[in-house]
Image (spheres, grey):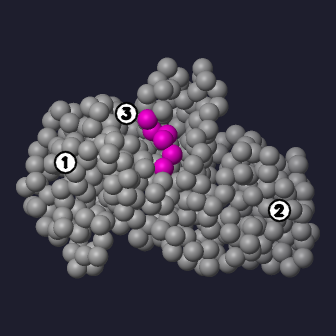
Amino acid sequence: MKIGILGYGTVASGLVDIIDNNKDKRDISIEGILVRDVKKHEHRKHADVLTDNIEDIFKKDVDVIVELLGGLHPSYEYLKRAIENKINVVTANKDMLAEFGGELVSLAKENGVCIKFEASVGGGIPVLKPLIESLEGNEIDSISAILNGTTNFILSKMYDENLSYDEALKQAQDLGFAEANPEADVMGYDAGRKLSILSTLSFNKRIYWKDFYLEGINKIEPKDIEYAKQLGCKIKLVGRSKINNGKVNGYVRPVLVGNDDIISKIDNEFNIIVVNGDFLGEVSFVGKGAGKDATGSAVYADVLDIYDNRLNNVDAFIKEKVSVDKVVSSECKALIRFKKPQKDKIIQIIKDKFKEAEVIAQDDELAVVVDAPSECAINDSIKFIEDNNYCEDASKILKLS
Ligand code: HSE
């Protein structure tokens, strides 16, 4: 089988290694690798097929185009053209699927080819295929997941080694986990896009990533980690979505996760996806969510599906789009921090508003843990306290329940 690879970054290097390693088992010939600057890659494997001109890839009559450029453009245009030319495509590009998944799947169906994208969610973890194929008889009603290796790495290093946010981010970048613009990682956009892909496939309805409540880890301070430890928890960037009577509720945000919860045990670049099916109950998928070899392995598995003629497309992307409720409307627990507080006033308000409220620190700031009937009730109390200038600044972190 002849393939063309678009891009020669971290994931493409992993793919090339695994193709070379398995040469005696599967005859996959790399016909072209598209790069921006050929000179920069001249010392690397397969340098003889490097090109900076997309036309060279299309001229080669390849069976599969593997898109590993990332970003929306020109990846979208290249994939569209490949599909229209009846070439099967593989991509790891979650940004593009989150935006154009529906259009590309429709186009692939029209042209009798397939689009595969296992590596777009969970890096090396084989999660999409089991969701689509093995859990088909189940109605999935919830997903709780760590979907970004970079932020999980940063939070782990802050928790375990007291590294600063900036030091930990630098390490994640050096290890090749982060996006070209790490804002997508730290602001929760990357996890949001992945959660939308997972939710679309699981709930069989089109769910748009920007409809989730999205909050990154950029405001997490060492003090938050200290409080988490005091409460027997870790802080994790969690994506959670639920469907109930056709209504979807979902977010990506930093949450407190109790030390006995499986999600709290997933550290560094590892990801976890926990789904709940009506027949199966809870099932978890765990593995490396970022990095060269792990993600290359997931891309390779997609290439093999095409090699072995498993050419199915998923319809979920072309289903009707549903709206998403962004706030947690059920009972929830939260840590709330008030900076420069008028302590007595705030404690009084909190005790009046919430059945359960525990003060866990009151030095130069006030930290409380409350049990609330809903997230709105917490937001309303914080707003009231801020509007009355009873503190300078307030922040909250929900506990995963
Ligand atoms: N930047 C992404 C992450 C890469 O850290 O999870 C894998 O999608």
Magenta stretch, residue numbers:
124-129
Q: Which residue is mark 2?
A: 229
Q: Residue at x 88, y 54 (%)?
A: 357
Q: Quadrant of residue 150?
A: bottom right
Our reading of the magenta stretch's main secondary structure is: loop
Q: In the rendering, which numbered label is found on residue 2?
A: 1
| Amino acid on which disc 3 is placed | Ala
| Viewer-closest of 95 and 395 | 95
**In the displayed structure, would residue 119 be above or below residue 330?**
below
Number of other residues with Cα within 10 Å of mark 3, as a class: few under 14, some 14 to 19, many 20 or more: many
| Amino acid on which disc 2 is placed | Lys
Q: Secondary structure at mark 2?
A: helix
Q: Is residue 73 left or right of residue 161?
A: left
Dots 3, 2 in contact, CB < 8 A: no
Q: Is residue 285 left or right of residue 42?
A: right
User: Image quadrant for the N terminus?
Assistant: top left
Can you see residue 80? Answer: yes
Q: In the rendering, which numbered label is found on residue 316?
A: 3
| Amino acid on which disc 1 is placed | Lys
Query: Horizontal and vertical percent for residue 128?
Result: 45, 38
Q: Residue at x 23, y 55 (%)?
A: 30
